[in-house]
Every structure is written in structure tokens, then in C-alpha cells.
Image (spheres, rainbow, N blue to C red):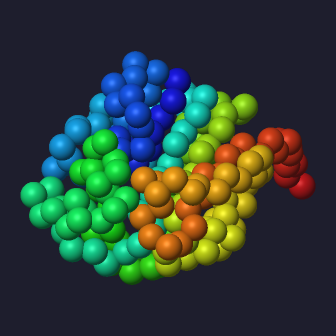
Amino acid sequence: MILDATAGNRSMWKHKKSENIIYIDIEKKLKRKPTIFADCTNTPFLSESFDTVFYDPPHMWGGEPFHHEAVGFLQKRHWARTKPFAWTYYGWDKYKTRNELIVFIYRAQKEFQRILKNDGLLWLKWNECEIPLNRILAIFADWTELMRLYVVDPTHTASKHQTYLVCLSKEKREKTQTTLL
């Protein structure tokens, strides 16, 4: 089973109604509703439930509150016109500061550690519009980077900044037994 942990309007998916994907988001005003309204930092799922998690967190902070009707500016952008479903929601309004965004990403990756199976994969989508990828990957200290793809498709690169898809696997840690003296 696959989890899209920040589904937005499912704009990154070509097929928007897959039975193999659970779409979650906390935004209530989305045009395409998620399967479940849930916070990706505290999901309702059992531990080790998913084979794969896709995570496309906000790449910026301090945006205006989300108004679906006010996204007309997107249609003027070249990259939005090329999308078959241009009603994209970025979540920039959820975090007022850089630190709030970093804390959100940290808490989400901890939750993904819990809900991914031991051989599970996390796909992180990141655009360097404000924070370089290497600084974000430092948050994922308990993960192993397996692959890094450079996105060149203008429908997934909203600016002159580089967008990446990074495949991470859970670090397998040996359980150590502590003894009391």
C-alpha cells in the first residue's frame, strides 16, 4: 500500500483515483478531497502499514491563507498552464516561520519511520526555492538515501530552483538491550 502524505489536490499524480494509494491532507478546501483528512505528523495508521510513502512538504513558509478561488495567478504561469490539473496547493500558509516548517518536516519523518514497513521506501520531493536539499536531508538522519533524481519537467519545477525526488529507506537499527546495575 502507498501513502501520499501531503496529497494537496493530487496534482503530482497522473491517475488521481488509484485504489493502491491512500491520500491524506489537512486542508479542508481542496478541490480534490483526500481519502482521509489527517495530519502527516500524527496519522491514524498502525505501525508498519505502508510499503511506500510519498512526501511533498511545503518548500516555503509565510504564505497567505489558502483560498481555492484565488489561485488564478497559477494559470498565468507557464508551468501551471502545462499541467492537466493546475489547481495546485502548496501548504505555504500553514507555517509562519522557517523554524515551524523544519519542525513539521522533522515530526513527519518520525511518523513515517513508524508507519513504514521495515523494507519501506520514502520518496521526498523537494524544491530548493528557500532551503538547499542537503539541509533538508540532514533532518532525515535515520534514513539511507538510495537515489536522487533531478526533476527537469517544467510541470514539476515551479521556478528556476532545482526540484528533486529523493528515495530514502529506513535505517535498520539493531535493538540493544540495556541492563540495570
Location of the C terminus (image quadrant): bottom right
Q: Residue at x 61, y 43 (%)?
A: 122
36 horizontally vs 65: left or right: right
Q: Residue at x 57, y 57 (%)?
A: 152
131 horizontally vs 92: left or right: right
Q: Quadrant of residue 35?
A: top left
Query: For the view shown, which residue lies furthest in the left direction?
Result: 69
Examine the rendering and report whether any part of residue 153 can be seen: yes
> Residue 33: x, y in percent?
23, 38
- 151 vs 7, nearest the viewer: 151
> Residue 164: x, y in percent?
60, 58
Examine the rendering and report whether any part of residue 103 can be seen: no
Q: Residue at x 42, y 44 (%)?
A: 12
Image label count: 0
> Residue 180: x, y in percent?
85, 52
- 41 vs 120, nearest the viewer: 120
